[in-house]
Image (tube, rainbow, N blue to C red):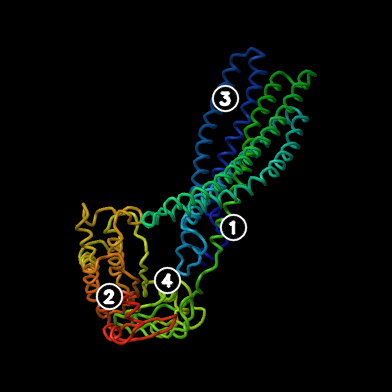
Amino acid sequence: MGAGELSGRDVLTRSVKGQTRRVALGSALGSVHQLGEALVPVLIGVVIDQAVAGQDAGRLALWLGVLAVMYVTLSWSFRLGAKAGERSAEEAAHTLRLAIVGRVLDARGGAEEGRLPGELANVATEDAKRVGAVNMALMAGIWAVSGVAVSAVALLLTSVTLGLIVLLGTPVLLWLGHLLSKPLERRSEAEQDKAAHASGVAADLVAGLRVLKGLGAQDAAVERYRRTSRISLAAALRSARAESWQTGLVLALTGGFIALIALVGGRLALNGSLTLGQLVSAVGLALFLLGPLETFAWVNAELAQGRASAARVAEVLATGHAVVDGDDPVAEPVRGELRLRGVRLGGLDGVDLDLPAGQLTGIAVTDPAGAEALLRCLGRETDPESGSVELDGVPLTRLDPAGLRAAVLVAAHDAALFEGSLAANVTPEEDSQGGEADLLTERAMAAARADEVADSLPHGTATGVGEGGRSLSGGQRQRVLLARALRAEPPVLVVHDPTTAVDTVTEARIASGLREFRQGRTTIVVTNSPALLAVTDHVILLDAGRVGAEGTHADLVRTDATYRTAVLA
């Protein structure tokens, strides 16, 4: 079962189960700490009654030694318990991040539909962190329950009245705290939605900053982000107000509860029902209870925010796949023959295509929508609405999507570079070990003329390209992207407009290098570039979603007016 087939609750349960031992250890250590905290005022009361009031120096030294041991135990149990809790929370969040990233990278796709990249990043970071923090909140809740239980027992042994107040009053406080957390949960979910959308818009605008500047549209883009950011800010303020009201009301209720315990204890002392030491213990326990009860308020807030984030994580993980799952492995060796029969999708209207194995085929289009639809079909990002696409006679729907991705590589013209060096963007890390791998990289870079890009950089291939390759020009990025696609050496390579941002001389050299590098392997170039189409073995023209003409580039330029208009105009 893949990560995408699990609900958010299933993944959360799995991550919590994976941390069961650490959660149990942290809960036990935290409970020991709470037990010690609750016993401190009891011991102080004992010291007052048995040593101070009786003026017994020996007993005083004995009980002070007991208190010292208690404080050492308190220190270490808290440190170790908190460490176990934080580690459990971080590892749970890490498990969720892996599940989310696994779903986004699933070869069957679908998770990215309707979501900006920044939104998915926000879910994988902030929401996963909040859900992971539920582990720490649950442990803190167990500690607080332990503290209240020990305090109630101690107060019952001191005074039945005080013990009953704690035992009966604490559940009421917890119930009220739960009711007060409901508005926070709703507003926290809205806040995360708006924050994720703002992050997505910001990432989208930064990625297209050069284009926006070129169009003179940066002011409109800034205004768009400003509106989105204001909406996000308003949601965050509403969430903060809800949290402040919840915290304030819970603290007010807690303060009233503690005051009631102190008042009753004082009256019992005046009546002679409690000794001086017992009164000190009762007041000390009442003050100690403030900590666990405040922890309950914090736990309620954390759980409310965790539930809101869990819903967003669950939505991503439960997103349906864009394509159906195939079970058949891709047959080896891959000949690379592609065939389309009656394919309808987007700009394609019943297309029949035969793309022979081992040849360089050019596909020109009169409508860019047709090119986009064709690329989505060949890369199996989407299955056709009708018709079929076959690889070596086997429908793509029967093939394992991950295996198909390795056999057929679709290199989109707008693919992204990664932050890091130029070399790291071309060569897979596991292959960069020298020898034949380095020779293959050199050949791929030379074919794409990316070696010229490296020569122009201060540190050659070791030069960083920046986030998304923004330190490079558009033409340089295209050459690096093409080199990366060539270096992968897939049995079938589909490239889309790989030279739109380079000059005509460089484009002609890239066309020649591409043909030479891919000699004898199936290569499809979807472009209207005359330089690239001129080096192909065969050209197909898609006109109005159908095959309009076929032949060599030279023949089609001479005989087909529609082709001439599409390619030479």
What is the C-alpha distance between the residues marked 1 and 4? 26 Å
Q: Nearer the viewer, residue 328 or 154?
A: 328
Q: Position of residue 285 (x, y in %)?
A: 67, 28
Q: Is residue 60 above or below residue 461?
A: above
The answer to which of marks 3 and 4 sits earlier in the sequence is 3
Q: Say what amino acid the circle numbered 3 marks.
A: Leu
Q: Which residue is mark 3?
A: 67
What is the C-alpha distance between the residues marked 1 and 3? 45 Å
Q: Which circle marks residue 402 in the picture?
A: 4
Asked which secondary structure carries label 2, the reply is helix
What is the C-alpha distance between the residues marked 2 and 3? 85 Å
The answer to which of marks 1 and 3 sits earlier in the sequence is 1
Q: Which residue is mark 2?
A: 532
CB under 8 Å between discs 1 and 4: no
The answer to which of marks 2 and 3 sits earlier in the sequence is 3
Query: Closer to us: mark 2 or mark 4?
Result: 2
Q: Which circle marks residue 9 in the picture?
A: 1
Indicate left or right for 339 with 159 as reference.
Answer: left
The answer to which of marks 1 and 2 sits earlier in the sequence is 1
Q: Position of residue 186 (x, y in %)?
A: 64, 49
